[in-house]
């Protein structure tokens, strides 16, 4: 069992930055690929970035590539999402997730944290 708790959301002006954290508890955190999803108002939840268990492989959706950076610290059971050059369209609830198999059905979810970008 893995519990995920996000923090770091908030309100920021367009062009600003935020850093989200996801703290994991439970065993075998380093065995999971970790990722961030987001759900914007009126839209489906989408995977925006992911990182492999060792941190050596990453994925970024085109919408965030070059602006967002995912990282993980297996010693601290934490993943980070550095978000720069934020846009109003980045406004969403951001969820941390963990999977051992596939991103279409993650094994664990965090509760979500709201990010609001004002224009």
Image (cartoon, rainbow, N blue to C red):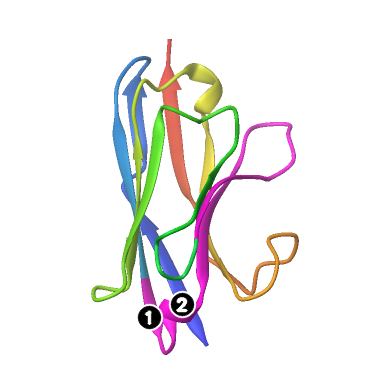
Instruction: Look at the image and say whether residue 47 sits in the magenta stretch.
Output: yes
Q: Residue furthest front?
A: 56
Rendered location of residue 33, percent (x, y): 52, 67
Quadrant of residue 5 within the rendered picture: bottom left
Residue at 29%, 28% in the rendered image: 17
Q: Which residues are magenta?
A: 24-51
Q: Which is more toward the observer, 15 or 8?
A: 15
Is 85 positioned to the left or the right of 108 in the image?
left
**The label number, if any, that marks residue 25 in the structure image:** 1
Mark-to-mark CA distance, 2 and 1:
5 Å
Rendered location of residue 43, percent (x, y): 73, 34
Dot 1 crowding, Cα within 10 Å, few <14, some 14–19, many 20+: some
Q: Which is more toward the observer, 61 or 107?
A: 61
Quadrant of residue 45 within the rendered picture: top right
Quadrant location of the C terminus in the rendered image: top left
Q: Secondary structure at mark 2?
A: strand
Q: Secondary structure at mark 1?
A: strand
Q: Which is more toward the observer, 96 or 114?
A: 96
Pointer 2 or 1: first along the chain: 2
Q: In the rendered image, which residue does mark 2 sit on? A: 3
Circles 2 and 1 in contact, beta carbons < 8 Å: yes
Residue at 40%, 22% in the rendered image: 86
Instruction: Look at the image and say whether residue 29 sits in the magenta stretch.
Output: yes
The relative height of residue 51 versus residue 40 in the rendered view (above or below) is below
The relative height of residue 103 versus residue 49 in the rendered view (above or below) is below
């Amino acid at each position: 069992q893995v519990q995920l708790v996000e923090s770091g959301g908030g309100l920021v002006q367009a062009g600003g930055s935020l850093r989200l954290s996801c703290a994991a508890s439970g065993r075998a955190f380093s065995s999971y690929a970790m990722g961030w999803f987001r759900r914007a108002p009126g839209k489906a939840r989408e995977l925006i970035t992911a990182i492999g268990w060792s941190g050596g492989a990453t994925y970024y959706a085109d919408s965030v590539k070059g602006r967002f950076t995912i990282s993980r610290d297996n010693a601290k059971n934490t993943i980070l999402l550095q978000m720069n050059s934020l846009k109003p369209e980045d406004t969403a609830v951001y969820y941390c997730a963990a999977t051992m198999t596939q991103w279409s059905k993650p094994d664990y979810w965090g509760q979500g944290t709201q990010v609001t970008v004002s224009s």
